[in-house]
Image (cartoon, rainbow, N blue to C red):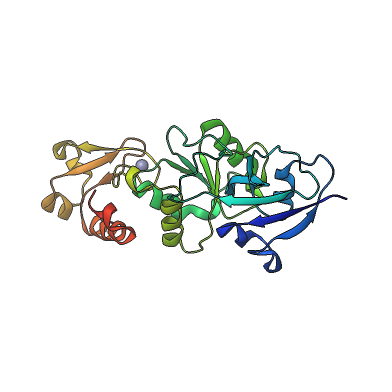
Amino acid sequence: MPEASLRFYEELNDFLPLKLRKRNFRCSFVQGEPVRHVIEGVGVPHTEVEVILVNGESVDFDYALQADDRVSIYPVFEALDVTPLLRLRPRPLRSLRFVADAHLGKLARYLRLLGFDCLFFNDAGDANLVRISKDEGRVLLTRDRGLLMHRILSHGCFIHGIEPRRQLQELVRRLQLENLCKPFTRCMECNGLLAAAEKRQIEDELPANVRQHYDAFWRCDHCGRIYWQGSHYRELRAFIEGLSPSLGKQ
Ligand SMILES: [Zn+2]
């Protein structure tokens, strides 16, 4: 069988067995096999790969490996100009929207807090998540790397962190979300949009102490939940400021 030499960079190494990390290693393949198969064969989902160089030239996922090719595989670059290189998928999506896997409910709520459209279901099932991602142009967020290996999936993102706040920071950094955030514009419960509400129109629905102390209100256009800038709001604002100082100013 022919062999190629592979080298994965940066966090792509997290998907590899220890002995293959941060080094060149040989990998055998079937004649004519696309490079994507070989990359996923060692455990790295294609959604995590941004640029592939073969003998110094950028190629796409369908490139048929040749014997003794030297393959360098890179993740999404942060702050590095890769315009001369072939990106593996169209970027960016026209509007950045998400669908979160069932184990990422808290991350989904945090994304909504920052104003991002993020669908979340307790029981969607893998096939549905992939279909929603594809049909609606949503980035699929998951900690299940097998899910990201679905062939039809084009925009997915493996979440490395375990703790939801870290997951959010990881995503903000990777997708450079800071300038796209619109905190407190979306319902954390249902993903609906918030709109300013007249106090006199919702007065009957407010607890007495809220009616007494607050005058500015927002209502979710989907589930009808009413929001005001109470102690919970202040906690969430502190949470957002803690993520990144520039976010706190918005
Ligand atoms: Zn709502």
Q: Residue 13's x, y, as percent?
A: 61, 61
Left/right placement of residue 23 relative to residue 227 reads: right
Note whether 244 is above or below 92 in the view shown: below
Note whether 158 is above or below 64 in the view shown: below
Quadrant field for ligand 1 = top left
Q: Residue at x 73, y 60 (%)?
A: 25
Note whether 209 is above or below 227 in the view shown: below
Left/right placement of residue 145 relative to residue 120 reads: right
Q: Residue 105's x, y, as percent?
A: 48, 53
Q: Quadrant of residue 33?
A: top right
Q: Nearer the viewer, residue 14 or 238?
A: 14
Q: Residue at x 78, y 50 (%)?
A: 68
Left/right placement of residue 40 relative to residue 207 reads: right
Q: Residue at x 42, y 34 (%)?
A: 95
Note whether 85 is above or below 165 in the view shown: above
Q: Residue at x 41, y 40 (%)?
A: 117
- Tell which residue pokes out farthest to the bottom in this image: 19
Q: Residue 204's x, y, as percent?
A: 19, 42
Left/right placement of residue 176 relative to residue 154 reads: left
- Tell which residue pokes out farthest to the right in this image: 1
- Tell which residue pokes out farthest to the front in this image: 56
| Count of numbered circles in the view | 0
Q: Residue 121's x, y, as percent?
A: 52, 45
